[in-house]
Image: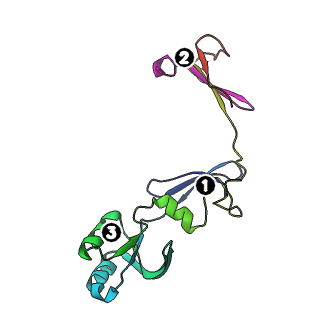
């Protein structure tokens, strides 16, 4: 899947060019990882978390190595309370990672590339088109804009009722083409 945009708005939204423009939505609750050097010292907190949130024992990889711990399906506020309760002894991971980025990493996806490409390589094809725009009116004053033309392999006009879009007439501002 060649992804050119991702964001989180209640769920992960991915925009891709899979057989044309495609939007994919995926439910993805917020979560983070917790490692405690001495989990037995915090057994009551862990039990309390398990009674309120979805908590899974797991091992996870970080840039510092592999750790045993828990994946906690909770918000940043839950993570902040854990930090306070453990007096900052808990090592928390992915608390600050955007949910769409976390989803992409877990699914081994990345923007502007396919699965068989390296996310670290700067050399990959970008299958996007270049669009030019012509605006009839001054773009600095939106009320004065009477028409917008999008120029690609086919010319598309967007204007007011019954008004034509003059091509390259006075007052038409053209964006520079690469």
Q: CA distance from mark 3 to mark 2?
A: 51 Å
Q: Nearer the viewer, mark 3 or mark 2?
A: 3
Q: Mark number for residue 85?
A: none
SS at badge 3:
helix
Q: Are marks 3 and 1 in contact (CB under 8 Å)?
A: no
Q: Nearer the viewer, mark 2 or mark 1?
A: 1
Decide which of 118, 50 is in the foreground and name it.
118
SS at badge 1:
loop
Residue occupying the far bottom of the picture: 40
For marks 2 and 1 on the same chain, the one whose residue lies earlier in the sequence: 1
Q: Mark number for residue 111?
A: 1
SS at badge 2:
loop
For marks 3 and 1 on the same chain, the one whose residue lies earlier in the sequence: 3
Residue 19 located left or right of residue 40: right
Q: Are marks 2 and 1 in contact (CB under 8 Å)?
A: no
* Residue 93 in picture, x, y percent from top left: 42, 70
Q: Which residue range is magenta in the image?
A: 137-156
Q: CA distance from mark 3 to mark 1?
A: 28 Å
Q: Badge 3 is on which residue?
A: 79
Crowd around label 3: few <14 · some 14–19 · many ≥20 (10 Å): many
Q: Mark number for residue 137?
A: 2
Residue 152 part of the magenta-drawn span = yes
């Amino acid at each position: 899947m060649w992804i050119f945009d991702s964001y989180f708005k209640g769920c992960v939204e991915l925009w891709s060019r899979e057989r044309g423009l495609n939007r994919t939505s995926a439910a993805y609750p917020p979560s983070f990882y917790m490692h405690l050097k001495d989990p037995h010292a915090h057994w009551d907190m862990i039990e309390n978390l398990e009674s309120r949130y979805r908590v899974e024992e797991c091992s996870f990889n970080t840039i510092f190595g592999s750790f045993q711990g828990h994946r906690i399906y909770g918000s940043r506020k839950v993570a902040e309370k854990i930090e306070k309760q453990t007096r900052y002894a808990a090592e928390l991971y992915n608390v600050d990672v955007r949910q769409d980025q976390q989803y992409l990493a877990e699914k081994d996806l990345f923007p502007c590339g396919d699965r068989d490409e390296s996310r670290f390589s700067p050399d990959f094809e970008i299958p996007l088109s270049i669009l030019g725009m012509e605006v009839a009116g001054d773009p600095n004053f939106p009320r004065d804009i009477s028409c917008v033309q999008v120029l690609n392999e086919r010319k598309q006009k967007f204007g007011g009722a019954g008004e034509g879009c003059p091509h390259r007439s006075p007052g038409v501002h053209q964006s520079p083409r690469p």
